[in-house]
Image (cartoon, grey):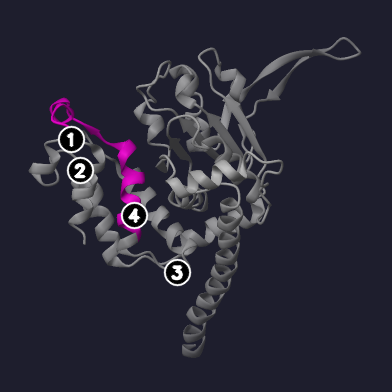
Amino acid sequence: MSASHDFQPTSLEEAVSRQAEQALEKAAAARASVGEVIFGQKQVVEEALVTLFAGGHGLLVGVPGLAKTKLVDTLGAVLGLDARRVQFTPDLMPADILGSEIMEESQDGRRAFRFVRGPIFAQLLMADEINRASPRTQSALLQSMQEYHVTVAGERHDLPRPFHVLATQNPLEQEGTYPLPEAQLDRFLMQIDVNYPDRAAERRILIETTGEHEARAKAVMTADDLMAAQRLVRRLPVGERIVEAILDIVRAARPGEGDAEITKHISWGPGPRAAQALMLASRARALIDGRLSPSLDDIAALAGPVLKHRMALTFAARAEGETISAVIGRLVSRIR
């Protein structure tokens, strides 16, 4: 019996190691393939891949023209996912996303309702400019993002697996935007800020996208490959120090629980789902970087994207010029 007990963990470790090697190769190929189309956004591409490998939804925030939509298109092609795009507008209705029932009459005169699926029945849904739609329509995504099914006319309809929402959002100060409800923001694993490219990247964009030929994304993974990687992410071991660091950061970001000098700026903080998101995201980042266990560097790198949309500053803090990113930065510095 003792030999059997000694052998099983080794066998499990070898199996995980083989799966990790395969996932690592495919993740590296996916990153390279995306990089052939998206220039100068290395961190954005990494965070988007981390979001998908962790099995979550992502919110890409940035001004128009920074290739947010192109990035989501490219990810769908590279990962071999059935992708659909919905352009969110003020007059978009929930049924336009979820689908609706229509009355049909058969040849013998019988009438019956038939459910016509909406664009949400895809493996990768691109919700383009999500904050231009009304709050009612934004909320229509809530159940699907959390429960992976929709209910129309009392009937449940399961969504394909995997199912991911990658939404793009314009900054709130732009015309014609509606802030997302806090409950919906919490469904996004990470908020990925898309900034302007540096000069070298913009030069490459200028040259390579205005010629006769334009680079096309190549599929290097399948939906099954992605789901296998997602299962592996959940099997990766996490050290006690990492677990404590996650708890330290998340709990310290709540009013009344952390350092009073920091929490006095916070109106409301992240809930347990934030800690879950940080745990999964750190594992996914480790896998993509070729490691079988997350480190404090992963926690530090992902704390901002995971927490910033799950917190709000007090009015006084905003008046003083305080920012969420600065507050998170001070929390991260305490785990180093």
- Dot 3 and dot 2 residues touching (CB under 8 Å): no
Residue at the image position 51 percent from the left and 53 percent from the top: 53
Q: Earlier in the sequence, mark 1 or mark 4?
A: 4
Q: Earlier in the sequence, mark 3 or mark 2?
A: 3
Magenta extent: 298-321
| Outermost residue toward the left in this view | 261
Q: Earlier in the sequence, mark 2 or mark 1?
A: 1
SS of the residue under disc 3: loop
Q: Which mark is residue 301?
A: 4
Q: Amino acid at mark 2?
A: Val
Q: Earlier in the sequence, mark 3 or mark 1?
A: 3
SS of the residue under disc 2: helix
SS of the residue under disc 4: helix
- Disc 1 target residue: 322
Distance from the alpha carbon under mark 3 to that under mark 4 = 17 Å
- Disc 3 target residue: 292
| 328 relative to 144, above or below | below
Q: Amino acid at mark 3?
A: Leu
Q: Amino acid at mark 1?
A: Glu
Distance from the alpha carbon under mark 4 to that under mark 2 = 14 Å
Please name whichever residue, 322 or 122, is drawn nearer the observer in this view of the structure.
Answer: 322
- Disc 2 target residue: 327
- Dot 2 and dot 1 residues touching (CB under 8 Å): yes
Q: Can residue 145 be found in the magenta stretch?
A: no
Residue 280 seen from this side = yes
Distance from the alpha carbon under mark 3 to that under mark 2 = 30 Å
Q: Earlier in the sequence, mark 3 or mark 4?
A: 3
- Dot 3 and dot 1 residues touching (CB under 8 Å): no
- Locate residue 307 relative to residue 106 in the image: left or right: left
